[in-house]
Image: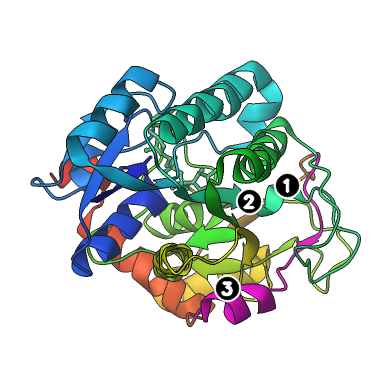
Amino acid sequence: MAILVTGGAGYIGSVTVELLRAKGETLVVMDDLFRGHREALPPDQAFYQGKAGDRELIARIAKEHSVDECIHFAALAYVGESVEDPARYFENNVEQGVALMGALVDAGVHRIVFSSTAATYGEPKRIPITEQDAQWPTNPYGWSKLFIERLLSAYDLAYSLKFVALRYFNAAGATAACGEDHEPETHLIPNVLAAAAGEKPDIAVFGKDYPTPDGTPIRDYVHVTDLADAHIRALEYLRKGNPSDFLNLGTGHGYSVLEVIEAARKVTGRPIQARIEPRRPGDPARLVADAARAKRVLGWSPSSDMESIIRSAWEWKQRHPRGYSASA
Ligand SMILES: NC(=O)c1ccc[n+]([C@@H]2O[C@H](COP(=O)([O-])OP(=O)(O)OC[C@H]3O[C@@H](n4cnc5c(N)ncnc54)[C@H](O)[C@@H]3O)[C@@H](O)[C@H]2O)c1
């Protein structure tokens, strides 16, 4: 039996593949490589380039590899891009997500781990955010993920499709083999490290007038290996016959943008210039998880602090100065 990993050539997917293989799991990866890299996967990894919504392809992969579980990472994941072109997000994340889930149910797959997001909460009413808090996204990306969460609940009821939807806060960091290589890159830490490496003159800080101690937004950063570990635990949880669930993946500790930049100066030893820009619309002041439920349900406890997250990303960057394109 095998686990189908959609989006497994992407950032979080490739790290999860690395950890699953180290545990001896049998995997088959599919990815359209729009934002992923074949080089992020070991050469001997079973891999299909294609769309998650290609029902025929999914049916074929499921049959040929005896797929009985799926981890569904494949999605477009940039908030700003989703506001500019919502059709692309609903087509890619929702339409293809619906087709994928239908093909999986038809193929007899009954366990799914789904990449959801803190963006499904929208502007939080209180911090830290619990799984019971209201979900009212402020952008099409968040809605596309919330739609699949609702679909999963309905499919569980109707077709006994058991799932764990993991609502990640901010993924960051790297392993020795896999790191973050996106074009364009919108995430803070890779952009801060690009400034540290001299690839950019400075790092833009969007807003210094938020109601936070230093005026910059606060986010909850989780090491990508901790996220990958949560997926493995979620699969084990489902294999034991446990009920479907929604779980926040965060540390419960927030860092402001300026604190992240300061930590990066310390780790890299490089001066990193910050440039203050106006706020971006729709950026909440604080997004910090109450992660008690994931700890209780999965026994998951994220271990990394900001400096070790940045150190791992910096080491990866130094080994892969031009990302995967130069490291294959
Ligand atoms: N990075 C974060 O901080 C974060 C936070 C919350 C949720 N997430 C979610 O986690 C998942 C992985 O995020 P990531 O940061 O690794 O992103 P990523 O872009 O690196 O990985 C996504 C992968 O999916 C592939 N893909 C996209 N649409 C596809 C489709 N229709 N068919 C086949 N392949 C497709 C891309 O080519 C890419 O390799 C996404 O679902 C994202 O929404 C990420």
**Sequence-earlier tag: 1 or 3:** 1
What residue type is disc 1 on? Answer: Thr
Instruction: Report the side of 129 relative to 259 (left or right).
Output: right
Q: Position of residue 97 (x, y in %)?
A: 53, 30
Measure how far apart labels 3 and 2 are at the Cα level.
Answer: 26 Å
Q: Is residue 199 visible from the viewing direction of this image?
A: no
Measure how far apart labels 1 and 3 are at the Cα level.
Answer: 29 Å
Is disc 2 in contact with disc 1, using a CB cutoff of under 8 Å?
yes
Q: Which residue position holds label 2?
A: 117
Q: Quadrant of residue 175?
A: bottom left
Q: Which residue position holds label 1?
A: 120
Q: Position of residue 148 (x, y in %)?
A: 63, 37
Q: Residue at x 25, y 26 (%)?
A: 60
Is 224 rendered above or below residue 200? below
Q: Residue at x 64, y 19 (%)?
A: 85
Read off the magenta span. Answer: 281-302
Q: Residue at x 63, y 60 (%)?
A: 245
Q: Which residue position holds label 3?
A: 262
Q: Is residue 229 visible from the viewing direction of this image?
A: yes
Measure how far apart labels 2 and 1 are at the Cα level.
Answer: 6 Å
Instruction: Report the side of 198 relative to 250 (left or right).
Output: left
